[in-house]
Image: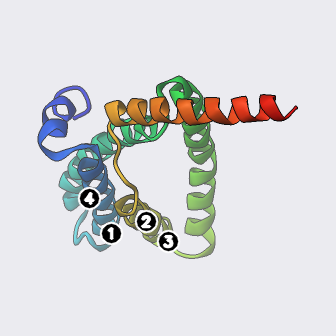
Amino acid sequence: VQGVLIGRLVPPFGEKTLAIAGLALQALGFVAIIVAPSASMLYPIALISSASAGLIYPTLTALIANQVAPQEQGQVAGVSTALSGLMSVFGPLWAGAAYDQLAPAAPFWSGALVLLLGVIFLTRVRATTQLAAAVEACSRRPEQSKRNLRKESHT
């Protein structure tokens, strides 16, 4: 999905729409795993869940990068990658504990809930293109320069 479809899907739908679709489909996939009537149904569910996961990472990465000025994108990408790494550690720990202590379906229900919270959060985020982020950064610079001049004149 990432290598073949994302480049073709982003222009007509946009990163935000694709990220929301990926998160929602992933949440539905978790619920479908819980209610699957037979083990053989897990194969198509896993296929759809994997495809939806392929929508999430590249689109969220682009959305995050486009929320900041170009010179800040590396720092934001580092923080995003670090948080992703932390969740790769703590997510399975939570899932194992929830499975053992609560119920076998608990990791899937909690995962679906977290993904749906992501959908809700993402619907409230204003999608910004890379060009818009650069224009916004340039428009802030003159104001910052004026503030610096005022500070220098008062000292």
Residue type beneath disc 3: Ala
Quarter of the image containing the N terminus?
top left
Viewer-nearest of discs 3 and 4: 4
Q: CA distance from mark 2 to mark 3?
A: 5 Å
Identify the residue shown where x is 46% and y is 34%: 139
Kindly identify which numbered label has been placed on residue 31: 1
Front residue of 88 and 24: 24
Q: Sequence-wise, which precedes: disc 1 or disc 2?
A: 1
Q: Is residue 149 visible?
A: yes
Question: Decide: marks 3, 4 in contact (CB < 8 A)?
Answer: no
Q: Which residue is mark 4?
A: 25
Question: Decide: marks 1, 2 in contact (CB < 8 A)?
Answer: yes
Residue type beneath disc 4: Leu
Front residue of 86 and 16: 16
Identify the residue shown where x is 29% and y is 73%: 35
Q: Is residue 49 visible?
A: no
Q: CA distance from mark 4 to mark 2?
A: 13 Å
Q: Sequence-wise, which precedes: disc 3 or disc 1?
A: 1
Instruction: Say above or below: 27 vs 73.
Output: below
Identify the residue shown where x is 59% and y is 30%: 78
Left/right placement of residue 134 relative to residue 59 reads right
Query: Quadrant location of residue 37?
Result: bottom left
Which SS class for mark 3? helix
Q: CA distance from mark 1 to mark 2?
A: 7 Å
Front residue of 120 and 147: 147
Left/right placement of residue 143 relative to residue 49 reads right
Question: Decide: marks 2, 3 in contact (CB < 8 A)?
Answer: yes
Which SS class for mark 2? helix
Q: Sequence-wise, which precedes: disc 4 or disc 2?
A: 4
Residue 111 position, x and y percent, is 46, 63
